[in-house]
Amino acid sequence: MSVIVAVRVRPFNQREIDLNSQLCIDMDGPRTTLLCLEDSKKNKDFAFDYSFWSHDGFELDDNAWQGYHCCLFAYGQTGAGKSYSMVGYGANKGIVPIACQEIFKKIESNTNPNIIYEVQCSMLEIYNETVQDLLVNVTKRPVGGLKIRQNTSLGFYTDGLSKHPVEDYDQIEKLMDGGTQNRTVAATQMNASSSRAHTIIVIEFKQTETKDNNRKFEKLSVINLVDLAGSEKVGKTGAEGARLKEASNINQSLTTLGKVIQTLAEKEMGKSKGAVVPYRESCLTKILCNALGGNSKTLMICAVSPSSDNWEETLSTLRYADQAKKIKNKATVNESATDKLIRELTQENEKLKIFMQKFQEQFGINLDSMDVSSLQKLDTKQVNIQEILIKKEQMEANEHLLVDATKTKKQRIEENKQYEDQKPQIDLSKPYLTNIHEDPQLHNKIQCTLDRQKTIIGSKYAEPKADIIVGLTKHNIAEIVYENGIIFIQPIQGQDESFILLNGCPVRNRIELKNLDRLIFSTTSMFILMDQSSQSRTEGLVFNQIDFEFVQIERNKYMELENKLREQENEFRKQQDEEKKVEQQKLWEDEKKKLEEQIKQLQMQPPPPLPTMKKQCSEKINKYKDKNYLEHKLQKYLPKVLEINLIAKELKRKVTLQAKIAQIYEENEEKKDAQNIINIKSKVQIQVDNKELGQVYIWDHTKFNERYYMIKDLLEKYFETNTLPVIDPSNDPFCDPPEPHLIGNGYFKLLYLAYFMDSVMDLSIVGENGQCGSLNVSIIPCNETGDINLSEKMENESCEEIIEDPNQLLGRTLYFKINIQKAQLPEAFCKDSYVEYSLMDQYGKIQIYRTETIVGKNSKPNYNYSKIFCYENLNSEHLNYFMERNLVFKVFGFEEIQIDRKKSEVNNQNLNQKRIELQDGNSEEQEGKKKIEGKKEVEGDSDKKKQKQDKGEGKKDKEDCNIY
């Protein structure tokens, strides 16, 4: 049977309602249509098994009851409603609780005393290709996570994953809450993002029936409920992802899942029959091996947003689902054979023990007392160390399986009771902190009591040991003190003030905390203070009002979000005004009289008609929506930018990021009028100032998101190894390789060709910030040899050949030549420039053409480019293309590296070495130097401090404003 694919659209969220977002999805039975609001001809139709606005889990339950393995996985961009579909919130139950409740209802309704039912629950997470048991406390997890192994009987399985027996859904819910809490703690401590992790709930449903002859028949169904990571992070960067493929494993599972689905789909369609399905390339695809193309009944839910703002992401999700529905599985009822499994494992281990015994006798060693490093010291010519290690691991894994297979139900219940007893009990009548998280599932899951005299907030790597561990820092950053029933917070001396925010403002000194105060540590760890003995600072504020967005808005107010918007808008208007000032001055005198006459006429005319007023009103509404949208984008990116800047400082990198609003000139291909082919849009961009290389470059939101997680990986490696990472420049997420920069576009009307006319133009090159150069282009009708005197010849031969109607060209052969000559380019981007354009060929396909590259720096290049095109038997499609389209000439160049911004001691070859030398306590020699040089620096430092104090006197009052 094929993989069942269902598409679910969540309701509009509050942000989308505030922005008046438009619906871009339409559903009718199994049909799902993605609506293009600008042009209905571009609507995308898809057909799936189910398309719905709600969800149902009964079919999944029926399959499990019959003894089939089942898998349900939710796919979609972050915020599309995957978790809502799987788990649900509040009264709206998701598929997991519905399916589980139905299983227990059927168990309760069973009247056959010869059938015994067992249900076990596990919960795991895959983050950055590391598998963790979410039902095990963070402090008790194995280093490096759990291993995924393969067994001939079981297939792929997770070695060491705990299984908890459950009697009803309430117990499953408690386990899920505990797993979510552990997941939240880990995410807070590791500075990880929940949207980048895959969460899998595994439910084993076993039915044992005793027949008349006392023979037992078992049916086992393993149900995998998978909440995948946000899909918008995958496959949007193209070559970017390939260049940095060694830098991070963060996308590996989703990328490999895409490859698996594509390979299976192609095999079902008769393509690539011999292709190997790449299950082994990631942890996720190993676990889902049966679910995709194996022994399982599989349902894929694609969660999509209803908002037109997410049109591209929704299209990507629907295309992914369209591939998945082509996969076919071969599901069979699974008759559990525990006795057979135990027998096979025992026999295999006996063989391994004999092999190990011979090996130990041959070399006179005891494997039990030797670690990996000791084994590697043995003579590799006489023994294959890798083979020994694999066999040793396999024997240990088999023993784990044997222990698990021979456990009785009573033993499992006892273990689960111990797990429940280990959970810490929190006295919520005393002051405590509770966490704030972007993911509603992880919000308000961590409670930390503050009734001790001193609570330290900081890193798990710091001394003394922190009571509340947060990410993004290697040091302890703050202390919360409890004195006489009053709570105070104070920063630890020497720590950056940006690491502690109280109600959005930096904390520089000791200050009293009040009920419902919001605390942010290390930019990402957020908490609310709950203290029943004190009053809130804000009258009328209640706990339910405080969420992730509330805290972000509060923080961004301090960061002067509104001022940033106004500054960017004013700067753009000022720039536009200056560019137009000279031209306006010349035209003003000529236009003055006309304007005065128009004013008189307008005064005599009635008010503008209703359509005009509606249009003006609509434009105002759109501007308001655009402003709100930009505010939301800035609100989203400013904290992340601050976080990366702090990480760069921690990693001793001379790189600074800044979020900016840029006015982008974009091409609108649908406009026929050349005067309206440019749209001006405001976009949030990230400006990267890399002082190590003397470069400034721009990241769009896609590239920034990719680099954001890679940079966080670097920080975690640094904390784990206490060594600054040595990075190959090609894999450095802080750097961009030299890439061609789109200087701007020139627009050429093809209409002249439809009238068989020569056209020579100096095109204005329009870039992100307006006109930035010019380009000389000519398009001239010719013959097959390039003769361009056709117009004169036609005029001399016959007046009837003059083209008055483009339809006269139908059925004829058209030759024309495109010449690209001189250009005027900006100095900053005129190195190695070239021109590129796209043109429809005679077969209706769009082809890309480009000039040769002008090597070196040249602000006035001459491309000396000429190419002849031929269109045989011209048809209406060709003519419509010429009459309606504008040929876009894209001019590219490389940025000239600003060498003068580099400091003399910085160069590419020794950057990594210098970063390492900046670490504290690298060697005794460095320590000795510090002691000797310290005496010399004391006097200089005191002089510098005095100078800073003198400069800072006048600023003190201003800096202390709104800061605790």
Image: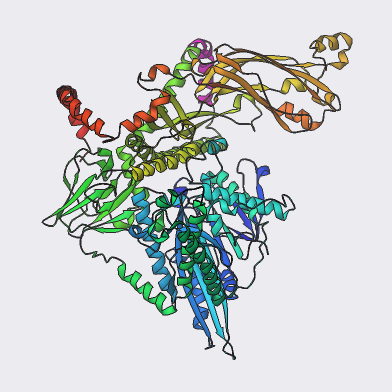
The quadrant of the image that shows the C terminus is top left
Across and down, in percent, residue 774 comes to 58, 15
The correct choice, above or below, for 418 with respect to 132 in the image is below
Q: Residue furthest left?
A: 484
Q: Is residue 58 left or right of residue 325?
A: left
- Residue 653 in the image, given as x and y percentages of width and height: 36, 31
Q: Nearer the viewer, residue 624 or 342?
A: 342
**Count of labels in the image:** 0
Residue lying at the far bottom in this picture: please name it. Answer: 212
**Where is residue 724, by image quadrant?**
top left
* Residue in front for this viewpoint, 150 or 718: 150
Give me the residue at 53% from left, 21% from top. Answer: 894
Task: Pick the quarter of the image with the N terminus.
Answer: bottom right
Where are the magenta residues, as a range? Answer: 585-604
Residue 39 x, y percent position in the rendering: 64, 41
367 or 700: nearer the eye?
367
Q: Residue 589 in magenta?
A: yes
Position in image of residue 847 (x %, y %): 71, 30
Residue 888 visible from this viewpoint: no
Residue 795 inside the magenta-drawn segment: no
In this rendering, would 20 be left or right of 871?
Answer: left
